[in-house]
């Protein structure tokens, strides 16, 4: 009788298992952001709200209110467009929460949960991937504004800084929509609450009329509204005027919003999944 000896399989001890790869969260988030971008490209109708809607707003406000507010539609266009840019990018962030809620309802995030990726990667990927919506919104608005007669009153670098500042603030606000997307049961609920939140934040500013022409109680709200700082900074950088500390206020509010709502969104996501 011959006994065949099998080679012993070496069992790796738990302490010898490979640790997590460095920058795993960054890589996973960028991979999922790429998925979000591909999804947007394959369904271009999702971009209608950031291409057609701001153009309609711009035409309506300029030609309905321009003569009454500024005495000239051309002057009002210079006053209004930077503020419309801020409003458009903020409204574009609502799709982040709606799409997130839809994916969670369809079980997409259950698949993500089974993958060896960081738990926060799907949320970060969704937010970063939607940056393309902000770029499309700003590009289409500026191009259409130029056709109507809008001209940059400063220089291209300052105008680019205004766009960057707007995107940074919108990126921070999108974490509010992410939180809503993880908490609400239906996408329609996310959209409804988001609209109720965005309307007083965007219209309760000096977007359509100078602050000095508003009643006292509304001026008090404009002064504490963080969106007012973004619009004031965008106007100063694009058409001229005193910038003051508006850019610093914008960056400060952006950091505060991310510090508060990003952890809350991740916590709500972990509880739900």
Image: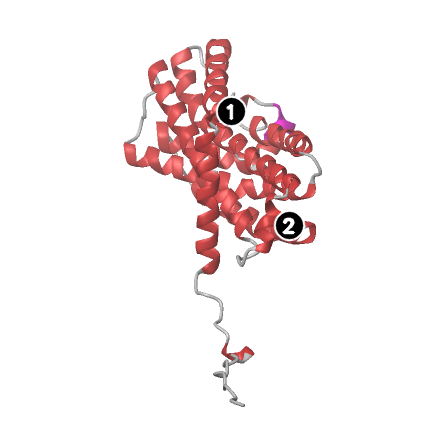
x, y percentage for residue 79?
Answer: 43, 22
Marks 1 and 2: in contact by CB < 8 Å? no
Tell me if residue 216 is in the magenta stretch.
yes
Q: Nearer the viewer, residue 64 or 138?
A: 138
In the image, is 44 to the left or to the right of 188? left
Q: Nearer the viewer, residue 14 or 118?
A: 14
Callout 2: 10 Å neighbours few (<14), some, many (20+)? many
Of the numbered discs 2 and 1, the one sitting upstream in the chain is: 1
Principal secondary structure, stretch drawn in magenta: helix
Residue 49 disc label: 1
x, y percentage for residue 137?
Answer: 43, 28
Q: Secondary structure at mark 2?
A: helix
The boundaries of the magenta stretch are 215-219
Q: Is residue 146 above or below residue 180?
A: above
> Mark 2 highlights which residue?
269
x, y percentage for residue 39?
Answer: 48, 35
Residue 262 shows up from this direction: no
Q: How many marks?
A: 2
Q: CA distance from mark 2 to mark 1?
A: 26 Å
Tell me if residue 95 is in the magenta stretch.
no
Which residue: 50% across, 9% down? 64
| Quarter of the image where one finds residue 155 | top left
Q: Secondary structure at mark 1?
A: helix
Q: Residue furthest right?
A: 185
Callout 1: 10 Å neighbours few (<14), some, many (20+)? some
Quarter placement of the N terminus: bottom right
């Amino acid at each position: 009788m011959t006994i065949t000896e099998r080679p012993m399989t070496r069992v790796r001890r738990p302490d010898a298992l490979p640790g997590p790869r460095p920058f795993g969260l960054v890589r996973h988030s960028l991979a999922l952001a790429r998925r979000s971008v591909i999804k947007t490209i394959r369904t271009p109708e999702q971009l209608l709200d950031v291409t057609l809607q701001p153009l309609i707003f711009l035409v309506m406000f300029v030609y309905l209110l321009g003569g009454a507010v500024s005495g000239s539609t051309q002057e009002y266009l210079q006053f209004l467009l930077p503020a419309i840019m801020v409003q458009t990018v903020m409204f574009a962030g609502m799709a982040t929460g709606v799409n997130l809620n839809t994916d969670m309802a369809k079980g997409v995030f259950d698949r993500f949960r089974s993958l060896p990726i960081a738990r926060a990667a799907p949320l970060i990927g969704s937010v970063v991937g939607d940056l393309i919506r902000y770029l499309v919104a700003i590009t289409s608005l500026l191009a259409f504004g130029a056709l109507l007669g809008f001209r940059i009153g400063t220089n291209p670098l300052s105008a680019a800084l205004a766009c960057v500042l707007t995107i940074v603030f919108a990126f921070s606000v999108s974490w509010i929509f992410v939180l809503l997307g993880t908490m609400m049961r239906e996408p329609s609920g996310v959209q409804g609450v988001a609209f109720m939140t965005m309307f007083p934040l965007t219209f309760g500013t000096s977007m359509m009329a100078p602050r000095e022409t508003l009643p006292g109680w509304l001026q008090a709200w404009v002064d504490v509204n963080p969106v007012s700082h973004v619009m004031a900074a965008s106007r100063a950088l694009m058409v001229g005027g005193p910038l003051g500390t508006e850019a610093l206020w914008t960056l400060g509010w952006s950091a505060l919003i991310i510090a508060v709502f990003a952890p809350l969104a991740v916590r709500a996501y972990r509880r739900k999944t």
